[in-house]
């Protein structure tokens, strides 16, 4: 029989019904005190075990989280170190190449100009040939013989072409050097209060010829966001790099969508294309300097490295979702609550 | 209204299956079959039964049923203790599978009253709150008030849940609440009360006024969701 005593403690009593005269007597005895205290002790141990087991699982989870954070931090540090060393190296290389490049380019321009002058002189000389022939036939003969020997007609046509090609090649080297310099000096840029939407719009305008070439349309959807403290030049360059990739990955008639919104204390710039997508084995390499899947000569492989560098300098994050054949979404997340608020105060 | 009828059908089917699961679970634990009881619950979890629903539909209902069986003299105190111990064992296994969000709605400390032997209700509250997005530290029932205060301070908790099953522990609850109010004031820390003792109280003692009282897991979730919105 179960009872609750006056102090609200439940007990189970062992009962017997005993005949007594013409009545029945209910005889109840409590369980042995020793049993009762053992039961309570067991209950307490079970309770302690439940608390410890729960805490054990929590500690395990905490450990797993810490380990994951540690791995992330470690890989971030390795990456930063790699980027820092690479930054120093590229800055050095860019500087060393830039100086000879400048005079070679200058000389090429001078050569082109001088050769054009020479051609003008030769044309004058050619126009005067009949007169020379009548006045000094032996000089005329020497001029004609030499002109035939050096292939003057061929030279007059091919040398300007070669000089033009040289200048184009040097312009390309100059662009690569500029990329390398930008890559190594992005964190030195000045910070200002800027509108994200305006930056994206102007970047998109610059890409007009590329959009036309690929037959791609850019659609934008901008949330009404307050201005952001950022380095506008590098940030626009990062957005431009992402947009160029999106356009180049798209097929004619496809749309690249650019959306801005606020996401829990972050400004989010999201660029989505419907293009070829990124192979899963390439995803982990997209931020590696000099990694490119574009044909040789079409890209330096620094575009997404620069994006990474710029976003990191803004204390932001980049996320990429991509499926081969289905397109790619690149999300650039820039913080605006703490560090940016402080920067605004500094600016004011 | 075919759609309503369809929805109702789904809800009824769910209630039937919950009730069947709860009855099976009750039979296993009253027979002292710990492993089959665990397997039964793990199968339900693996087939998609959400953990908080298992707590509400199966554990809570089973423990209420055990109380009713004891009141009607069908089981003994020892049976009750065995049922509780097996459920604690099953819960500790199930807890490992609880999905925890990285972002939490708040930090809670859940405790029983020192000397109170009934701990499973507070344990269930802890797990269900954790599944609902709270970062919960469960102290059990054997922590003195000073320890509770230290834990609140260490965790930076904004919610304290105090559980008491036995009516005679209410003075201890009052003592703890008064100490907590003295230490932390009336502002940042909310104190929520729950457990069987509060079911028996005709009215809340004036020392506990202002503390919300919850009597089951559903009420706990409803109340904590209201509280978390104010943080």
Image (spheres, coloured by chain):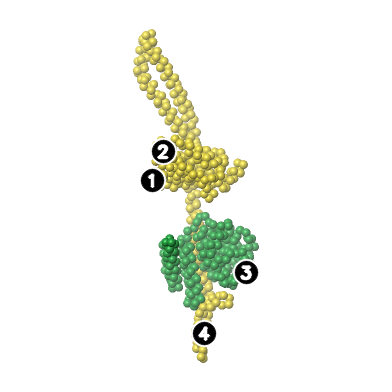
Residues at marks 1 and 2, CA–CA distance in whole angstroms: 18 Å
- Which residue is at 56% across, 60% downward? B226
Viewer-side label of 2, 4: 2
Q: Which mark is residue A325?
A: 1
Residues at marks 3 and 1, CA–CA distance in whole angstroms: 68 Å
Check disc 4: other Cα within 10 Å, few if <14, some if 14-19, many if 20+: few
Viewer-side label of 1, 4: 1
The residue beneath circle 2 is A215
Check disc 2: other Cα within 10 Å, few if <14, some if 14-19, many if 20+: some
Residues at marks 3 and 4, CA–CA distance in whole angstroms: 39 Å
Q: Are marks 1 and 2 in contact (CB under 8 Å)?
A: no
**Residue B87 locus on image (x, y percent):** 47, 68
Check disc 3: other Cα within 10 Å, few if <14, some if 14-19, many if 20+: few
- Which residue is at 49% across, 65% downward? B56
Residues at marks 3 and 2, CA–CA distance in whole angstroms: 76 Å
- Which residue is at 50% across, 82% downward? A15
**Tag 3 subunit:** B
Q: Is residue A52 visible?
A: no
**Tag 2 subunit:** A
**Residue B2 locus on image (x, y percent):** 42, 61
Residue A150 appears in which quarter of the rendering?
top left
Q: Nearer the viewer, residue B99 or A137?
A: B99
For chain B, what colour was chosen? Answer: green
Viewer-side label of 3, 2: 2
Q: Which mark is residue A26?
A: 4
Which type of secondary structure does the marked residue at label 3 adopt? loop
**Tag 4 subunit:** A
Q: Which chain is yellow?
A: A
Please determine if labels 2 and 4 lie on a single subunit: yes
**Residue A277 locus on image (x, y percent):** 41, 45
């Amino acid at each position: 029989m179960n009872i609750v005593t006056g102090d609200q403690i439940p007990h189970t009593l062992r009962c017997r019904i005993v005949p007594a005269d013409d009545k029945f007597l209910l005889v109840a005895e409590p369980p042995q005190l020793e049993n009762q205290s053992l039961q309570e002790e067991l209950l307490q141990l079970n309770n302690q075990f439940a608390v410890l087991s729960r805490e054990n699982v929590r500690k395990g989870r905490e450990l797993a989280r810490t380990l994951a954070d540690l791995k992330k931090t470690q890989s971030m540090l390795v990456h930063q170190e790699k980027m820092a060393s690479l930054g120093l190296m590229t800055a050095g290389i860019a500087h060393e190449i830039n100086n000879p490049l400048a005079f070679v380019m200058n000389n090429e321009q001078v050569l082109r100009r001088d050769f054009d002058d020479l051609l003008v002189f030769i044309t004058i000389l050619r126009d005067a040939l009949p007169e020379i022939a009548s006045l000094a036939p032996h000089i005329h003969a020497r001029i004609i013989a030499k002109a035939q020997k050096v292939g003057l007609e061929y030279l007059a046509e091919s040398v300007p072409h070669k000089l033009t090609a040289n200048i184009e090649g040097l312009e390309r080297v100059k662009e690569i050097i500029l990329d390398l310099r930008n890559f190594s000096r992005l964190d030195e840029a000045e910070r200002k209060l800027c509108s994200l939407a305006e930056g994206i719009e102007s970047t998109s305008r610059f890409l007009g010829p590329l959009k036309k070439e690929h037959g791609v349309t850019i659609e934008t959807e901008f949330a009404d966001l307050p201005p952001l403290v950022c380095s506008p030049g590098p940030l626009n360059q990062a957005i431009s790099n992402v947009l160029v990739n999106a356009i180049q990955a798209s097929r004619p008639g496809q749309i690249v969508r650019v959306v801005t919104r606020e996401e829990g204390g972050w400004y989010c710039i999201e660029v989505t294309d419907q293009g070829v997508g990124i192979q899963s084995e390439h995803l982990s390499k997209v931020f590696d300097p000099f990694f490119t899947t574009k044909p040789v000569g079409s890209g330096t492989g620094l575009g997404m490295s620069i994006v990474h560098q710029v976003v990191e300098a803004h204390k932001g994050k980049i996320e990429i979702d991509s499926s081969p054949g289905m397109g790619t979404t690149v999300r650039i997340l820039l913080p605006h609550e703490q560090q940016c608020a402080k920067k605004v105060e500094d600016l004011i | 209204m075919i759609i309503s009828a369809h929805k109702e059908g789904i809800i009824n089917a769910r209630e039937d299956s919950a009730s069947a699961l709860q009855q099976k679970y009750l039979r296993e634990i009253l027979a002292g079959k710990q492993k089959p009881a665990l397997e039964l619950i793990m199968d339900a979890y693996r087939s998609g039964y959400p953990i908080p629903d298992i707590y509400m539909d199966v554990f809570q209902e089973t423990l209420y049923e055990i109380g009713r069986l004891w009141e009607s003299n069908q089981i003994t105190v020892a049976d009750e203790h065995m049922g509780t111990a097996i459920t604690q064992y099953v819960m500790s296994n199930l807890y490992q599978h609880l999905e925890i969000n990285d972002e939490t709605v708040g930090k809670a400390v859940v405790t029983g009253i020192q000397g109170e032997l009934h701990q499973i209700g507070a344990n269930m509250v802890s797990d269900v709150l954790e599944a609902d997005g709270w970062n919960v530290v469960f102290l059990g029932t054997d922590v003195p008030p000073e320890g509770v205060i230290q834990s609140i301070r260490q965790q930076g908790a904004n919610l304290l849940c105090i559980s008491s099953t036995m009516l005679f522990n209410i003075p201890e609850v009052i003592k703890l609440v008064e100490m907590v109010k003295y230490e932390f004031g009336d502002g940042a820390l909310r104190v929520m009360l729950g457990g069987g003792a509060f079911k028996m109280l005709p009215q809340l003692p004036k020392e506990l006024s202002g503390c919300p009282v919850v009597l089951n897991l559903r009420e706990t979730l409803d109340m904590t969701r209201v509280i978390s919105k104010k943080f």
